[in-house]
Amino acid sequence: MQKFTPLILFFLLNTGVLLSQVDTVPPVIQSHGLHYGMLGCSDSLYLSELVDTVYDNYSAFNTIKMGLRIGCTGQESPVGINVIWVRANEPIEVEIRAQDEAGNIAVDTVIVFVVDPGCDPEAIFVARTPPLTDTYPLIGIRHVDFHASLNNCSGDTLDEYYQNLESNYYHGGFGYIFPMGYNGAVTADKNTNPLNGVTTADLVSISRHILGIEPFDSPYKLIAADANQDGKVTIYDVVILRKLILGITDELPNGKSWRFIPEYYTFPDPADPFQTVFPEQFDIINGESQYGSPYFFIGIKIGDVNFSADPSQ
Ligand SMILES: [Ca+2]
Ligand SMILES: [Ca+2]
Ligand SMILES: [Ca+2]
């Protein structure tokens, strides 16, 4: 190291010019996890609740910058954030950061577990038939497989299937469902009984739409009419459905019987739902859906444009 008089050294250290050269040691954080009960499904968590003390070899206590965040939730430095929201009934990895004047960063991780027996963390998945009219009640579709496939930045995966055999009617309530820090998607599947609801009446309607005699008035009908799922309603779709009705084939293209779209999705152009790719999943970011929860899907029986399919089959 260069030689400085004590006065110059004091000045350089104080202004930070030299500090980054002489101090390469990050601060030391002494912290602890938490496990406590509460009422309410989420709670604010303060940095001061987790940190016992912090110290550094050069920087004074009051010059050390600190912050916290949920683990696996972004790249930006959380320094300066001293309170976060945490959800009940799931172990939460919380990352604590301390930065000294020279810019050295210490990272400490603790586990926080907040328990609220009154908060139901259960996932709620619902698939319902498309609306026949604006006011028509949506009917629950049974035997739908909901699949959550998620992972976090530590490489942990969450891969779960849910099925509600009794009913997919919505009974109220909501669930947070997935741990914070996890990203991925929730999809719905039902690929049984491809003939369900598909009759010659549907073929007639699709033909009339193609010929422009009576165009479909619902994006869900257009999606139902697209039997080969190529984003177009053409005579080829009619051919496929006719073969199915006649028993020449016993499944629809891609092995699919139903398609499921998040109920909250609004088609930019309802007259042309294929104009942009519509979502067939709920994207999950940091344990939550972009549309919130519960997970409502509209289920469209392929080939059934007058919605006559039995949703219990
Ligand atoms: Ca230091
Ligand atoms: Ca098609
Ligand atoms: Ca039908």
Image (cartoon, rainbow, N blue to C red):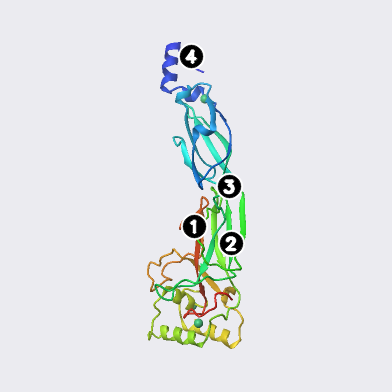
Number of numbered discs visible in the structure rendering: 4
Q: Which residue was labeled with disc 4? A: 3
Amino acid of disc 4: Lys
* Cα–Cα gap, marks 2 and 3: 20 Å
The numbered mark, 3 or 4, whose residue comes first in the sequence reads 4
Task: Kindly state the secondary structure of the residue where label 4 is placed.
Answer: loop
Percent coordinates x, y for residue 304 in the rendering = 50, 80
Distance from mark 2 CB to nearest ligand 2 atom below 8 Å: no
* Cα–Cα gap, marks 1 and 4: 63 Å
Q: Nearer the viewer, mark 1 or mark 4?
A: 1
Q: Which residue is located at x 45 percent, y 37 percent?
A: 81
- Tell me if I can see residue 5 in this picture: no
Q: Which residue is located at x 44 percent, y 15 percent?
A: 10
Q: Which residue is located at x 41 percent, y 70 percent?
A: 275
Percent coordinates x, y for residue 83 in the rendering = 46, 38
Query: Which circle marks residue 147 in the picture?
Result: 2
* Cα–Cα gap, marks 1 and 3: 17 Å
